Image: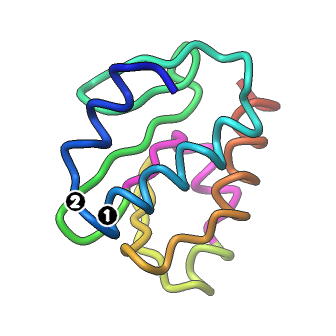
């Protein structure tokens, strides 16, 4: 994990930090060779392939509008809030398998 991403995650406490580390690992498993950096104030993989961020009550996943549209039914079934390019996964209810699938989609549809 790049130091800047570790610093970002370390700003969060307890279970929030654990969920952010788990999301990082799920994405990293799919995108092991992508550059890691902070972009728009959040951990970013590659040239804006996918981002994630910690919020007060959820982990935000930012895969872009095409990925959100592709997974909209799954997100609705899991009762995850989502908008044009963002997904909210409440702390303690983060679906890491789905995060990995979304990262794969982003990788394959750049």
Q: Tally the marks.
A: 2
Q: Secondary structure at mark 2?
A: loop
Residue 69's tag is none
Q: Position of residue 73 (x, y in %)?
A: 66, 75
Check contact, mark 1 vs mark 2: CB within 8 A. yes
Give 19 or 38, whichever is nearer the viewer.
19
**Vertical arrangement, residue 108 with respect to residue 46, above or below:** below
Q: Position of residue 24 (x, y in %)?
A: 53, 43
Q: Secondary structure at mark 1?
A: helix
Q: Position of 89 compared to 34: left or right? A: left
**Vertical arrangement, residue 62 with respect to residue 82, above or below:** above
**Vertical arrangement, residue 20 with respect to residue 90, above or below:** above
- Residue numbers of the magenta segment: 60-72
Q: Residue at x 68, y 50 (%)?
A: 102
Mark 2 Cα shell of 10 Å, populated few (<14), some (14-19), many (≥20): few
Can residue 84 be found in the magenta stretch? no
Q: Residue at x 42, y 17 (%)?
A: 37
Give 51 or 3, whichever is nearer the viewer.
3
The residues tagged by marks 1 and 2 sit, at their Cα atoms, a distance apart of 6 Å
**Vertical arrangement, residue 10 with respect to residue 80, above or below:** above
Q: Residue at x 34, y 46 (%)?
A: 53
Find disc 2 in the rendering and name its residue: 13
Where residue 56 sits, quadrant-wise, is: bottom left
Q: Position of residue 86 (x, y in %)?
A: 42, 52
Q: Residue at x 71, y 24 (%)?
A: 110
Q: Position of 16 compared to 50: left or right? A: left
Q: How is the image coloured?
A: rainbow
Can residue 64 be found in the magenta stretch? yes
Mark 1 Cα shell of 10 Å, populated few (<14), some (14-19), many (≥20): many
Residue 16's tag is 1
Give 43 or 5, whichever is nearer the viewer.
5
Q: Position of residue 52 (x, y in %)?
A: 42, 43
């Amino acid at each position: 994990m790049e130091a800047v991403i570790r610093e970002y995650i370390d700003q969060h406490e307890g279970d929030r930090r654990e969920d952010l580390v788990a999301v990082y690992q799920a994405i990293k498993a799919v995108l092991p060779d992508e550059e890691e950096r902070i972009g728009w104030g959040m951990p970013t993989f590659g040239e804006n392939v996918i981002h994630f961020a910690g919020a007060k009550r959820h982990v935000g996943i930012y895969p872009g509008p095409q990925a959100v549209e592709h997974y909209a039914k799954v997100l609705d079934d899991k009762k995850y809030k989502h908008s044009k390019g963002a997904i909210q996964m409440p702390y303690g209810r983060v679906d890491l398998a789905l995060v990995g699938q979304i990262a794969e989609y982003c990788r394959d549809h750049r």
